[in-house]
Amino acid sequence: MRFTRITIRKLALTLLIAVASGTSFAADNVGFVYVSPIGDAGWTYQHDLGRLQLEKETGVTTSYVENVAEGADAERVIREMAKRGDKVVFATSFGYMNYALKVSKSFRDTAFVHVTGYKLGKNMGLVNARFYEGRYLTGVIAGEMSKSNVLGYVAAFPIPEVLQGINAFIKGARSVNPEAELRVIWVNSWYDPGKERQAAMTLMSQGADIITHHTDSTAVVQAAEEEGKYAFGYHSDMSKYGPRAHLTATTHHWGDYYVKTVKDVQAGRWAPISVWGGYAQGMIRLAPLNDAIPADLQARIRDMEQQITQRKLHPFAGPVVDQAGKTIVAEGSTMTDEQLNKMNYYLQGVVSKIPNN
């Protein structure tokens, strides 16, 4: 029996029907929990591409539930997947962390993987991507191409992962344009197209001529297209939503990781470790570069991609100076992963304030 798109309300009924009909779930069933609709671009869309790759390359049966809120609904969905016999459950949003960890303690024969969190369990691993690598490169493009020297950023929640992207973006911009400044608006949601659009319009009204976002919808790119400004997509190539505006995007690629994880579980060699991949692991790439980007700048970006892949360039190589002027990383040193994962501040060049700071 194969489950495809199901809503939270239908999940319990579906499971009851399966039990009543005597259907058993094979050990190779794999479940995915998504925080937003799949759509055709964005965070969840990229994870679903990975799910489809997993099916194609391994032959396992997968199921998913989309648009699951980060709360009690998440715990219920994760628990139901484990109860029905899924061998691996991927919880693909930051706010699922504590719920996945709680459920994992009741199902020790199931492998759980939480995406973007920081807590490991006896049978719960972690995975994340070094989004900041792509953000730095888009910052370089923005710094070179901005006419107003004002950049805009629509952000979801002030957690380290999001702050890494914001700070990498302004650091890249200021590496080529010391006059660049970045304004940030927080929408307190991963997926709210209306709020995302409103924030984008506000940033452009404040002088931003290039904007980007750490949210799930295409609203920011669409707003930039309407207003004649430039934008960087995120998660996916969003160029079809802004053919003129969309300069490129930091795109995420989860399929290889999903395939390896499931194969490791099947072979009995999986361990609950933390994986943080970037350019070098093929988990981060830039979408095609818009022809509006000058050819010499495109060549520089391609060269920088290679330097990041070869670990010759690190976006947070010193000096790294925070918004208050304090040196966080001295020249000649590089920010450690531990420091990155505790990031709770802005760097110089960001003119907004972090909520509750």
Image (tube, grey):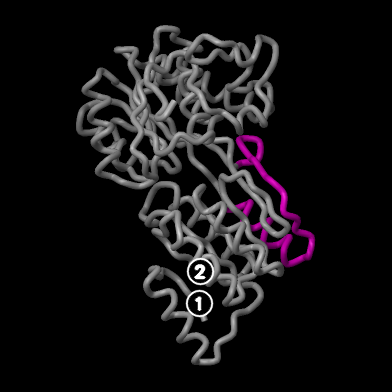
Q: Residue at x 41, y 29 (%)?
A: 356
Examine the structure image and report whether residue 304 is included in the region drawn in magenta: no
Q: Residue at x 50, y 23 (%)?
A: 345
Res 102 → quadrant? bottom right
Examine the structure image and report whether residue 259 is included in the region drawn in magenta: yes
The answer to whether residue 14 is left or right of residue 22 is: left
For this rendering, which residue is in front, 198 or 305? 198
Give neighbour class at mark 1: few <14, some 14-19, many 20+ (Cα, 10 Å). Answer: few
x and y, in percent, of residue 332 in the image: 69, 11
Residue 335, relative to residue 76: is it above or below? above
Magenta range: 255-282
Residue 2, relative to residue 172: is it above or below? below
Q: Residue at x 67, y 31 (%)?
A: 338
For this rendering, which residue is in front, 253 or 130? 130
Residue type at mark 1? Arg
Q: Residue at x 49, y 67 (%)?
A: 76
Q: Label 1: which residue? A: 2
Query: How far is mark 2 from mark 1, CA to CA?
Result: 7 Å
Residue 43, relative to residue 37: is it above or below? above
Residue 63 has which mark? 2
x and y, in percent, of residue 22 in the image: 55, 91
Give neighbour class at mark 2: few <14, some 14-19, many 20+ (Cα, 10 Å). Answer: some
N-term-proximal mark, 2 vs 1: 1
x and y, in percent, of residue 204 in the image: 25, 24
